[in-house]
Image (cartoon, coloured by chain):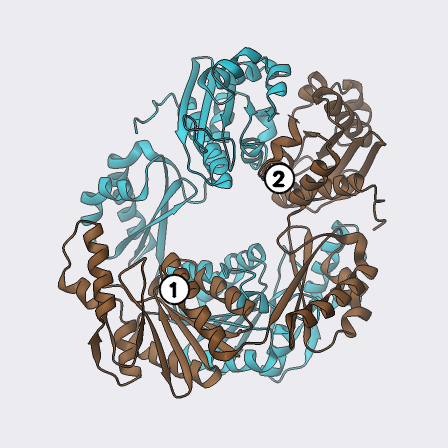
Chain colours: A cyan, B brown
Amino acid sequence: MLAEIITIGDELLIGQVVDTNSAWIGQRLNEIGVRIKQITSVSDNEEHILKALDEAGQRSGIILITGGLGPTKDDITKKTLAKFFKAGMRLDGPSLANVERIFRARGREVTELNRRQAEVPENATALLNPLGTAPGMWFEEHGRIYVSLPGVPHEMKGLMEQAVIPQLRQRFMLPPVIHRTILTQGIGESMLSDLLEPWEDALPPHIRLAYLPADGRVRLRLTASGKSEAEINAELDIQVAGLKRLANRYIYGYEEETMEGVVGALFRAKGWKVATAESCTGGYLSHRLTLVPGSSDYYMGSVIAYDNAVKTSLLGVDPKLFDEVGAVSEPVVRVMAENVRKLMGTELGIAISGIAGPSGGTEEKPVGTVWIAVSSPAGTLSKIFQLGQFRERVIREAAQHALAMTRRILLAEPEPEN
Amino acid sequence: MLAEIITIGDELLIGQVVDTNSAWIGQRLNEIGVRIKQITSVSDNEEHILKALDEAGQRSGIILITGGLGPTKDDITKKTLAKFFKAGMRLDGPSLANVERIFRARGREVTELNRRQAEVPENATALLNPLGTAPGMWFEEHGRIYVSLPGVPHEMKGLMEQAVIPQLRQRFMLPPVIHRTILTQGIGESMLSDLLEPWEDALPPHIRLAYLPADGRVRLRLTASGKSEAEINAELDIQVAGLKRLANRYIYGYEEETMEGVVGALFRAKGWKVATAESCTGGYLSHRLTLVPGSSDYYMGSVIAYDNAVKTSLLGVDPKLFDEVGAVSEPVVRVMAENVRKLMGTELGIAISGIAGPSGGTEEKPVGTVWIAVSSPAGTLSKIFQLGQFRERVIREAAQHALAMTRRILLAEPEPEN
């Protein structure tokens, strides 16, 4: 089955926005056995959108369109689709109720412009978008399927998962394709590939492996197809077991799990509570921990001690240490972890102190130097990291390493050597 | 002048790689007055590449092609271009010298496969690629310009900056195109559009407006072309002034500025310091403030008081208030802001307490209810927000509103009614 993606919006062509939607859609459709023939980005221009729709229909049976569904004048996708299908407009009841619900929840009045968001071409089946005011639209014309989705990534993804993917599967009786995602941390892509080589080389041809590195972790995605879901699942179970024999100490989770979710579940299981003391990460570790719904059950709070005066006044760091060993040092980060634990009465205290840059580095402690300590009833573990020279990346990776250390302490697993 | 981008590679269509090259090229070409008509991604398939080249040439005078120039068999762009132009191959001397230089530097032997990297179609002008073995190629046929570039981003960018952009500018004596981006906060896209309607309707046809909403803010982008940069800038100055007359109280910055950067510059200018006390945002406000390089000059630290016990022990909130009015209330958030300011000795204290969800909401205080207070030498300002029902979005928007309130206090501007 062939599909095309058409992304609409001037912002894509002048490069103000990178088109990440297409890659996501390509991946998801590929997973259910639909091959993308072409991706086309065009501007908010009626004539050009009409031409792109026509050309795509000549090549492929499924055409997915994203973007251009906002309420303002520069968004013309809906109007243009109506013209393409020579259809009038109708007000879709459930979509209008959805618009009204969203505005009520925000305590705002529904304007005429908002109300028009619930209009769809007469020949469209509206796809309810609980995350936004623009409904998706499903058209079947000339033996082809056209689907129009909002360009806002989380709205597009929600509609794809809830409506488009299930309907395409059912419609084309696509053979089952199953994915397993294994999440690893603490090892780079090429070292992981070396480690997995014997296992990877022995994979049968209908099971494919992809390495997806991002933000200090590598996701491994296995994709398999076959006759029945039960058969594929059994085969994948065997392969995942083989993978675990080689790389288990780097695996922290599966599928859509997050490191903070995995760590949160461990806190919950042990009945432990946690507090953090952060310097260079400026609250990003706390943010990660509190992204998890229900984290208030185990996360008490944090002291963000960006200034050394706060490290002393709230976390009891002896100011002499700043002169003797510096704020980015093992003794300071240990005191921070131990004292925030006492201050908030928790089983675990996590502390981070480092140099996020771009300034503040020295020959001895260059930008990217980060000390992390985790204090628990078993004692305090501390570790140094070199996380490169890009501020945001240092912050993100430091939080990721702190969570990984915390996970191993909760599991009473040793830290890997590397 | 119209251009098209064709990106070639299976990895783009199955979504293993996000096409960031096109956005970069689009931005750079737009800056010199070349408008991108279409971006097309196709697989490593000869027939499909030939068709894409043909179609692009029917629409545009400049066709930029990236990808598919590697030495392996799956890379067929060069061979396909030769076929498209019905040209034979020639070995390009300077390109071969470049390949040899690169392999010498790596201490490797040049294989036959590598040597062939220096072959180009007879009708191509080779563009020297100091960062890689695949030369760029410049073709002029049928009154159009075709440029083929490697897909590796830093190689592509090097060739664009060194060769392609200068040659296009010179060749077409391109008219200038200028963009202005105006950043607004505190008003939704549709209400902003209503507010701006009289001004928008009166824009001359050579000045276009786009609304780009994301994360609780709306960016407005004006794009104008004309005879001279001075003339366009003068016209844009007038239009931006008109826009400001209608919407000034929602404008917080311009171009690539961020809210935390704008707020940081104001702290710096006033010589004020800031501390925050966060509950439902769990450190995200601190994270935003500390994303700014040099924020340690004005940001002292934070108390993340997720648990009410921490609100009492570190921020001095009277525990009776939790029973009487609840933790998400004006009295609590005011005490938090005022006390964190005292605790860290700062001019400003910002506090947030709310219900991020998904649980914890009540009829009276549903999920998304957020109280924000900013305490300054002029007193303490507090405000309530309803930010919807999605945890991450409540967190992100609460931080954005807190920064916006802080900005207005630093500027001694009143809060808008909304």
Viewer-proximal residue among A25 and B244? B244
Please provide percent x and percent y for residue B278.
Answer: 68, 31
Would residue A208 appear left or right of B39 to someone viewing this image? left
- Give the Cα separation between the discs numbered 2 and 1: 36 Å
Q: Amino acid at mark 2?
A: Arg
Whether marks 2 and 1 lie on the same chain: yes
- Disc 2 or disc 1, which is closer to the eye? 1
Q: Residue at the location (79% across, 38% down)? A: B364
Callout 2: chain: B
Q: Amino acid at mark 1?
A: Leu
- Which quarter shows the N terminus of chain A? bottom left
Res. B367 in view: no
- Is B336 drawn above or below residue A27 in the view shown? above
Callout 1: chain: B
Q: Secondary structure at mark 2?
A: helix
Q: Residue at the location (49% across, 13% down)? A: A324
- Is A283 drawn above or below residue A125 in the view shown? above
- Determine which residue is flagged by label 1: B159
Q: Residue at the location (14% across, 60% down)? A: B111
Label 2 Cα crowd, 10 Å radius (few <14 / some 14-19 / many 20+): many
Location of residue A89 by image quarter: bottom right
The image shows a total of numbered marks equal to: 2
Q: Residue at the location (22% across, 82% down)? A: B88
- Determine which residue is flagged by label 2: B288
Location of residue B180 by image quarter: bottom right
Please provide percent x and percent y for residue A174.
Answer: 38, 65
Badge 2 or badge 1: first in the primary sequence: 1
